[in-house]
Image: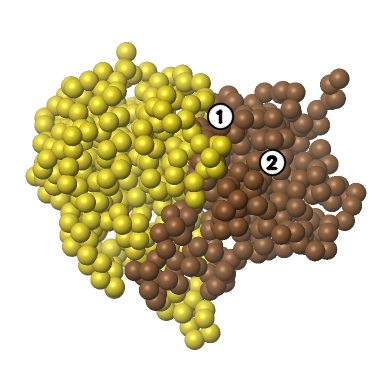
Chain colours: A yellow, B brown
């Protein structure tokens, strides 16, 4: 469906009617963060894979019905077992959530925060696209002769989107505000914005943010039906790119206003495309508004941004629009890349995984390049790099754009801007 | 320590359920001034969608666009510059049933339109497309606390951003085997325009605070109201709309296992 003619957005690149530009926010410390993806478990596994330019993608071995594509699959999820007290939440997505909580001792940091602030003062704001729909898919494959779910899957909480948020809250013994954000591929970026607002208004002292999305039939065959999946490992921004590689991942970050150490969330920007359910605005208008708001909240000019982790899915439309936007707004010294050649497109987890990769780029002084790609699309400016480069990165952005025209850009800093 | 009480203003109210189709009627029924129609109304056909698409739009889109448009109209608010929060417990249960069923038999024949309509933010996406709105939206879920958490996020955005905001909450009827695990009957959509400041459009004041859940159990709607939207997963919104209908009252809405959103609806003095 499209908007009726009379309600079409402006056709030019000029912004339409919009809300006023936001003012600067007080930065928030990220006292702990981690991710698990096809690259491995925890921060070091991700840094090593970035440095060694080792992709986590493999030929699809996930679907029963063959589908010729490459996927970013997390090893060992099938053997992962939830503790007995969490058995009610058993499913692939929550197993990955549990695995991710263990990585880099994130769970220890979260439990220490719980002891410091109290269980009711820590919010859980997590994003996902499909949550544990994989459990519902399995139930449909194994229906009883009466047409009912098999007995082991008669657990309502894994058949609803909030499965993820509810699991994380119970796994950590928390009792505060708890929400699952589901805005497709911007989900686990937008959680930073929602958490910052809760901290700013004093409704929480700390927030567990992040997201988890696991491979399932719905997304593999769904993206296949849209003719968006590539038969080869994805090549973001390559002139011969052939579509996306899907992946699964989890990631978490602990946000605390009072923390003494850790990088900073400097700002965020959110917007809508007002254009199409599964295709980006042709001039990247929504993306531009989100980017400008993130910079405004952070108090940064584009020229001060050292690195941008792009959405860069390797779909024809996204990469073209995003490349032009970068070329328009940033000087040549700003480095930009897509890391989806390493992880695949992890959908609802893309926001947090790429936030973590951006934070690692800040910490390691490493600007990742773009894996698998060989020759850049002519829409790309000098910002978009294929090779990794050592670089002092003080301020960095991460961009996430989703179906339904939902955009979110996050601004991070290793230090505070003057 | 007593949590601070904050105030917001209700500038627009909308509601749609088959036996309470529209806020004007729903308000009268909830006030006891009239009885609900015996026959359920047909599902709304949002004028924002092109005529050819009104009938094939998913139920989630039909009911949420209807209440979103009515709430903005009532508030005299331009949707194109209004941020929004969309909340749904289960999202599009009919499409989820279709997807799970198709994946068993013919996964490679999955419909691309139904797939992109399956995302939890489909209704919000269509709303922003239809209204040429570049302002942000979010789409969230919190199981049985969905209505309360969505309202809280709306109130927080009104405080932090400082401008009026649209809140839309909805759930639809479950289909197929899924209905046993994610039960929901009929359609229910509810909309509010919440403003941080009083304006000529403000109807009621909404005082709110986050309180301990154990000492503030969720308010239960009257049996009569519950019967009119029997079994819809968004029924936890009803106590607030009862208070909005009478123009006063205190309501406690669940926020997960430990907290509650305490809301008091206060009438505004008539201003000539």
Q: Tag on residue B81?
A: 1
Please name the residue shown 31% across and 51% down the image.
A346
In this orientation, does residue B225 appear? yes
Which chain is home to disc 1? B
In this orientation, does residue A40 appear? no
Residue at disc 1, secondary structure: helix
Relative horizontal placement of residue A343, taking residue A280 as reference (left or right): left
Along the line of sight, which residue is nearer the eye, A145 or A41? A145
Relative horizontal placement of residue B152, taking residue A307 as reference (left or right): right
Numbered disc total: 2
Instruction: From this view, report whether residue A409 is shown above or below residue A114.
Output: above
Instruction: From this view, report whether residue A27 is shown above or below residue B100.
Output: above
Residue wearing tag 2: B70
Please name the residue shown 89% across and 52% down the image.
B34
Relative horizontal placement of residue A336, taking residue B203 as reference (left or right): left
- From the top left corner, tell me how far across and down residue A34 is, in percent: 28, 44
- From the top left corner, tell me how far across and down residue A129 is, in percent: 41, 52
- From the top left corner, tell me how far across and down residue A23 is, in percent: 46, 19
Instruction: From this view, report whether residue A207 is shown above or below residue A416.
Output: below
- From the top left corner, tell me how far across and down residue B174 is, in percent: 58, 66
Q: Quadrant of residue A357?
A: top left
Instruction: Count neighbours of disc 2 (C-alpha within 10 A) and say few if under 14, some if 14 to 19, many if 20 or more.
Output: many
Q: Earlier in the sequence, mark 1 or mark 2?
A: 2
Q: Residue furthest right?
A: B33
Which chain is home to disc 2? B
Residue at disc 2, secondary structure: helix
Please name the residue shown 29% across and 20% down the image.
A302
Q: Quadrant of residue B223?
A: bottom right
Along the line of sight, which residue is nearer the eye, B258 or B195? B195
């Amino acid at each position: 469906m499209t908007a009726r003619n009379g309600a079409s957005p402006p056709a030019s690149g000029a912004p339409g009617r919009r809300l006023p530009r936001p003012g600067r926010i007080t930065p928030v410390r990220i006292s702990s963060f981690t991710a698990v993806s096809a690259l491995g478990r925890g921060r070091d596994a991700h840094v090593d894979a970035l440095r060694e330019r080792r992709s986590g993608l493999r030929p699809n071995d996930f679907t029963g019905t063959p589908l010729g594509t490459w996927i970013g699959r997390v090893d060992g999820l099938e053997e992962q077992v939830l503790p007995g007290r969490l058995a009610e939440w058993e499913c692939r997505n929550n197993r990955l959530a549990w695995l991710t909580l263990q990585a880099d001792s994130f769970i220890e940091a979260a439990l220490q925060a719980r002891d410091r602030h109290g269980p009711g003062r820590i919010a859980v704001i997590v994003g996902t696209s499909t949550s544990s729909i994989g459990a519902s898919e399995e139930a449909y494959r194994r229906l009883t002769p009466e047409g009912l779910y098999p007995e082991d899957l008669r657990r309502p909480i894994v058949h609803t989107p909030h499965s993820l948020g509810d699991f994380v809250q119970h796994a950590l013994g928390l009792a505060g505000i708890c929400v699952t954000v589901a805005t497709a591929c911007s989900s686990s970026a937008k959680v930073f914005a929602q958490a910052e607002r809760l901290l700013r208004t004093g409704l929480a002292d700390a927030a567990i943010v992040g997201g988890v999305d696991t491979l399932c039939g719905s997304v593999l065959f769904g993206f296949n039906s849209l003719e968006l999946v590539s038969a080869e490992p994805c090549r973001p921004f390559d002139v011969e790119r052939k579509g996306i590689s899907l992946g699964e991942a989890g990631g978490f970050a602990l946000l605390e206003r009072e923390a003494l150490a850790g990088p900073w969330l400097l700002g965020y920007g959110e917007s809508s495309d007002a254009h199409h359910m599964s295709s980006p605005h042709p001039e990247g208008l929504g993306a531009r508004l989100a980017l400008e708001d993130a910079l405004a909240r952070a108090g940064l000019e584009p020229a001060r941004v050292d690195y941008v982790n792009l959405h860069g899915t390797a779909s024809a439309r996204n990469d073209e629009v995003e490349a032009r936007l970068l070329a328009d707004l940033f000087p040549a010294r700003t480095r930009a890349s897509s890391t989806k050649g390493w992880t695949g497109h992890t959908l609802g987890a893309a926001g947090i995984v790429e936030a973590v990769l951006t934070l690692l780029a800040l910490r390691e002084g490493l600007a990742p390049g773009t894996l698998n790609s060989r020759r850049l699309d002519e829409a790309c400016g000098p910002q978009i790099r294929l090779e990794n480069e050592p670089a002092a990165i003080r301020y960095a952005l991460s961009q996430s754009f989703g179906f339904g025209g939902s955009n979110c850009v996050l601004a991070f800093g290793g230090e505070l801007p003057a | 320590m007593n949590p601070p009480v904050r105030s917001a203003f209700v500038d627009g109210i909308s509601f749609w359920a088959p036996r309470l189709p529209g806020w004007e009627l729903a308000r009268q029924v909830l006030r006891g001034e009239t009885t609900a129609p015996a026959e359920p109304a047909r599902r709304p056909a949002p004028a924002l969608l092109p005529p050819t698409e009104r009938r094939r739009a998913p139920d989630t889109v039909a009911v949420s666009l209807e209440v979103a448009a009515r709430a903005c109209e009532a508030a005299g608010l331009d949707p194109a510059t209004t941020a929004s929060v969309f909340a749904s417990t289960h999202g599009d249960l009919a499409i989820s049933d279709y997807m799970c069923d198709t994946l068993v038999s013919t996964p490679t024949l999955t419909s691309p339109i139904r797939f992109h309509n399956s995302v939890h933010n489909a209704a919000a996406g269509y709303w922003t497309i239809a209204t040429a709105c570049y302002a942000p939206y979010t789409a969230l879920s919190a199981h049985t606390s969905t209505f309360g958490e969505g309202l809280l996020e709306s109130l927080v955005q009104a405080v932090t951003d400082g401008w009026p905001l649209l809140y839309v909450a909805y759930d639809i009827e479950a289909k197929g085997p899924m209905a046993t695990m994610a039960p929901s009957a009929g359609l229910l959509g509810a909309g509010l325009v919440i403003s941080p400041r009083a304006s000529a459009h403000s109807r009621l004041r909404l005082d709110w605070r986050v309180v301990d859940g154990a000492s503030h159990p969720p308010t239960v709607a009257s049996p009569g109201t519950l019967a009119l939207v029997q079994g819809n997963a968004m029924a936890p919104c009803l106590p607030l709309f009862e208070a909005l209908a009478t123009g006063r009252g205190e309501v406690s809405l669940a926020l997960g296992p430990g907290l509650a959103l305490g809301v008091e609806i206060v009438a505004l003095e008539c201003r000539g």
